[in-house]
Image (spheres, helix red, strand yellow):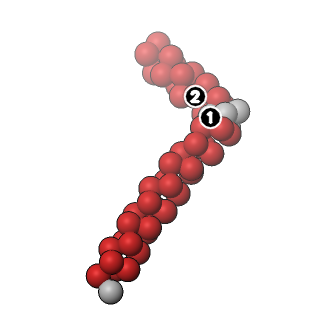
């Protein structure tokens, strides 16, 4: 099965390349944290304006 061999090589290469790009992981963390922080500030402003 040459297709299985090619796909296995492709996935192993992708797995090796992901740790070599820590900036991508940092970028995803930054996006998630900024979304959470934005939602929290929006909720806090709504609570503050209701008081």
Q: Residue furthest bottom?
A: 51
| Residue 43 image position (x, y, % from top left) | 36, 72
Q: Quadrant of residue 19?
A: top right
Q: Identify residue for label 2.
A: 14
Residue 35: assigned label:
none
Q: Residue furthest right?
A: 20
**Residue beneath the point at 52% across and 57% down:** 33
| Residue 37 image position (x, y, % from top left) | 49, 62
Q: Is residue 20 left or right of residue 29?
A: right
Quadrant of the drawing holding the N terminus: top left
**Residue 30 seen in the current view:** yes
Alpha carbon distance from label 1 to label 2: 6 Å
Front residue of this view, candidates 50 and 4: 50
Q: Quadrant of residue 13?
A: top right
**Residue beneath the point at 58% across and 28% down:** 14
* Circle 2: element type: helix
Q: Identify residue for label 1.
A: 18
**Residue beneath the point at 29% across and 82% down:** 50
Label 1 packing within 10 angstroms: few (<14), some (14-19), many (20+): few
**Residue 12 seen in the current view:** no
């Amino acid at each position: 099965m040459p297709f299985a061999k090619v796909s296995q090589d492709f996935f192993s290469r992708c797995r090796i390349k992901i740790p070599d790009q820590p900036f991508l992981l940092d970028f995803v963390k930054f996006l998630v944290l900024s979304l959470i922080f934005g939602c929290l500030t929006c909720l806090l402003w709504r609570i503050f304006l209701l008081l």
